[in-house]
Amino acid sequence: MNPLPQNLQREAERIASRHPCPAFYVQFKAPLSFARRLFFNHPLLILLRDRLEPVLQEDLGHGMYHSARVSIDGAALIQAEMETNPMEPARLERLILMGLIAGLLHDISRGEERHAEVGAREALRYLEALPLQTEEIECICQAIRNHEAFVTPKTCARPSFQLVSDCLYDADKFRWGPDTFTHTLWHMMNYQELTAQELIARFPWGMTGMVRIADTFRTATGRQFGPEIIETGMEIGKEIYRYLVQHFGD
């Protein structure tokens, strides 16, 4: 990363550290911890991460860091949603595994037009090389196909498929909160070779998109906790915008 976006990222991280942690990450520590253990230790996830590492580039801020965050949050959301609908532990763990895999693969075609649809087809190549059942592959591909914002999703064939799909979407949209300003923005700035003045000019438009996303969460847990995550991101963004204008504005 070039020096300017790198330095701005550090300043953004400093600003973000002064803000409270969103409640989702406090209330669901146990599901998040379980999801992380599976993510880093399950043989399927280890194999898939090794294969994706050279493919998921950070150029647009949607590389392995982003995919890992979506993967773990999506798996935790599945657990949270199933608290009121108990499932046999082995089945639930397998469903959580599907959520983790979907999160890792969801942005595999991020740079393509209609990246969700293209990504579902590209993900199929990786999934067919894994020891997964046909319906599990279908579940993951449907979730990837449905994760794009401001596009009407297709209804999934089974309730369990729908759960994985909705949790992937919500976990991906959680990234529109603080992650936007501690990670994604600076990789995009670096990749697009934006000046600080160009970034300032684009800021109001980007903040408008964040406001819109807050009303799109699909799970009950996402609707309860997602808006706060977005609001926290917006408060961080306002401080960063003031910092940019103070130091780089004309």
Image (cartoon, rainbow, N blue to C red):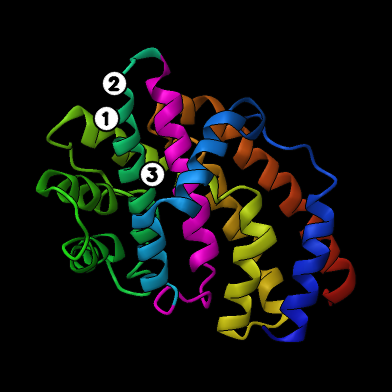
- The answer to whether residue 18 is left or right of residue 159 is right
- The answer to whether residue 97 is left or right of residue 76 is left
Q: Earlier in the sequence, mark 3 or mark 2?
A: 2
Give x and y (percent) for residue 77.
45, 33
For mark 1, give the secondary structure. helix
113 w.r.t. 148: above or below: below
- The answer to whether residue 209 is left or right of residue 126 is right
131 w.r.t. 54: above or below: above
Q: What residue type is labelled 2?
A: Glu
- Crowd tier of the residue under label 2, counting other residues whose Cα lies within 10 Å: few below 14, some 14–19, many 20 or above: few
Q: Mark 2 points at which residue?
A: 88
- The answer to whether residue 216 is left or right of residue 186 is left
Q: Earlier in the sequence, mark 3 or mark 1?
A: 1
**CA distance for labels 3 and 1:** 21 Å
Q: Mark 3 points at which residue?
A: 169
Q: Which amino acid does label 3 sit on?
A: Tyr
Q: In which quarter of the image is the C terminus?
A: bottom right
Give x and y (percent) for residue 78.
39, 32
Q: Does the magenta stretch include residue 128?
A: no
For mark 3, give the secondary structure. helix
Q: Do the residues labelled 2 and 1 touch (CB within 8 Å)?
A: yes
Residue visible at 34% across and 68% down? 108
Residue visible at 33% across and 56% down? 44
Q: Do the residues labelled 3 and 2 touch (CB within 8 Å)?
A: no
Residue visible at 18% across and 45% down? 136
Q: Give the range drawn in magenta.
A: 54-83
Q: Name the residue under label 1.
A: 91
Residue visible at 42% across and 37% down? 216
Q: Residue 29 carries which label?
A: none
Q: Which amino acid does label 1 sit on?
A: Arg
Q: Which of 115 and 82 is in front in this view?
A: 82
